[in-house]
Amino acid sequence: MESVIRLSKDALLRRLWSADPEIRHILFHAGDIYTARDQLFSYIDDLEERYFDVHHDNKLEHLHVFEKDNAKECIRVLKNIIRSENEKLTGFSALQTLMDLAHKPKSALTKVKEGFLAEFMALFRGINGNSEVLKHVHEHFTADGRRAALKRSKILDSYSSSMTRHFRRYVSGYSPALIKSRALLKQSILKKFGASDKDWNDYRWHLNNVIRDSKTLRSLVKLSKEELAGVKLAEKNDIPFEITPYYLSLFNKDGRNEHDRVLRSQVLPTTAYTENVLSNRKSKADLDFMGEKSTSPIDCITRRYPQIVILKPYNSCPQICVYCQRNWEIKNMEDASITQKKIKKATDWIRKNKNITEVLITGGDPLTLDNEHIDWILEGVAGIKHIDRIRIGTRTPVTLPARFDQGLLDIFARYHELGRREIAVVTHFEHPAEMTPDTLEMVKKVKSLGISMYNQQVFTYFNSRRFETCFLRKNLKLSGIDPYYSFNTKGKAETVDFRIPISRIEQERQEEARLLPGLVRTDEPVFNVPKLGKSHLRAWQSHEPIMVLPDGKRVYRFYPWESKLKEAHDYLYTDVAIYDYLKRLEADGENPKLYSSIWYYF
């Protein structure tokens, strides 16, 4: 499959039919879609039986067990796609399109993209035990004892050395070269604002000097033509962007490069992002993608799980992330305050419900508030007897580590009582380039209080290269932060630059994260289903592909976490096309061959 993205539509169609000529024969000779569906189901069922019938002497029975298992999954997916129920759910029939391609290839090819043909070529190869997923599998070794152990050790060495080779591509913020260049940019920023090192260590100075205009930004770092166009368009249309002086100091002063590409992507709005936001405004679309209004029993509270609630006392952040799931309600800092009366009502609501044992204080970023406000909020929540854990959801360890001053640390220490009530900090590092000596010192101070720190990464295009997230996990754990969740990117139109196929995060977990020690790969890959909560992407019972659309995008059907506990609604999600993702990787200099098994993650 590695060469598929360089083939023309005609060549892809030829390879599709050569992958399973019998399917083309069925589709060509069937008089209608009903006959085609019946005959195709019969063919697939017979194929499945031949794989596992030990009394049936055929070549399929003797395939490697991994190839047979992959064939079984491909058969399950192909059956899903040709079901009439799923055609009704999605409003599209891939089966009818395949029939059209068999009968009228020239006209039918104009109605599909390469990604559609590539998906079915992969499926047809898969159901026939010809996926090539085993091409890197080591030869079977039947010896036992010490000889087998030595052989196995060499295989494990090859896995580890491969991961190490990939790690050399990436750089953490602990790199001496980065530390030096960032120190120079820091001095330029201080000079620009007429500030001192003392100011730099005061979080309030950073909050008072957040960069939110293109003129200031351009005077400090070089922007590409595309970056400047996106920022100016956002400015013109009052779409806020905010960057703390500290985070800006992590940029490469002379323009985007390999080490700050992830950082820039998070805070510089692109023209595509801005145009999609404007389109939503014009159409008056509901921007609450996660359906949080439907899970908010009272102002400032979101509840989607039995024992934990989200308390949102502030609707802004020191820095705005372009891909934020709550960007529909994030405001400029000046307009983001929530009245103490509302927070008190929310706290009283929690106090009256003894089923709640944990509170996640987030927002926005609650640590944008001053210490007096933080103390007042924590005092109110900690005063509820049935609350045994308070999480602080904050990105300030990444965007503003100076926020963790002695006053804040003293407040945390006051309410953190092991055995009675835990304070935990949950943060959001996207890339090891964001980890710096400043963040490390901040973590040391928090950990010295006995407080645990966890990381929630959003798995985006910009950190999805081979072993890139593994390198983050390694650096997080060494720095005292436990990887907690890896979130699949949301399906909002404005975040299209960040989105990756679900199959890539599944591939990353199986082929990359699995090579790390267990204490390092503690994060769980999840898809956050609107209104319903997190669906674990390693559990195939929780989601299934049900259709492939003409542009090659898979449609997934998600089943909520509580589907075995009560009747619950499902959720349909249209993913990013694998073909488009691989093309984009190649355009950015990545080798698509490294991702060739991605088609077989569902």
Image (cartoon, rainbow, N blue to C red):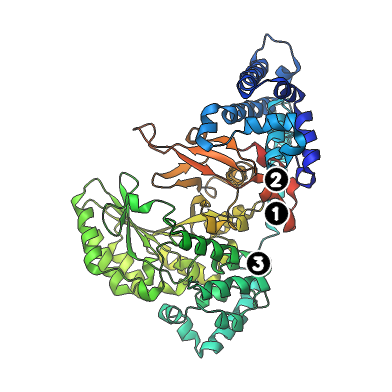
Which residue corresponds to mark 2?
Answer: 595
Q: Is residue 540 left or right of residue 71?
A: left
Label located before the other in sequence (1 or 3):
3
Provide the secondary structure element on which disc 1 rests. helix
Q: Is residue 361 left or right of residue 149?
A: left
Which residue corresponds to mark 3?
Answer: 259
The quarter of the picture where residue 377 lies is bottom left
Quadrant in the picture for the N terminus: top right
Provide the secondary structure element on which disc 3 rests. loop
Which residue corresponds to mark 1?
Answer: 585
Provide the secondary structure element on which disc 2 rests. helix
> Cα distance, mark 2 to mark 3?
22 Å
Of the residues tagged 2 and 1, which is closer to the observer?
1
Q: Nearer the viewer, residue 319 or 232?
A: 232
Residue 340 sits above or below residue 208 on the image: above
Residue 42 sits above or below residue 460 on the image: above
How many C-alpha atoms fall within 10 Å of the one at disc 2: few (<14), some, or many (≥20)? some
Query: Residue 550's spot in the image, x, y percent?
Result: 64, 41
Of the residues tagged 1 and 3, which is closer to the observer?
1
The amino acid type of the residue labelled 1 equals Leu
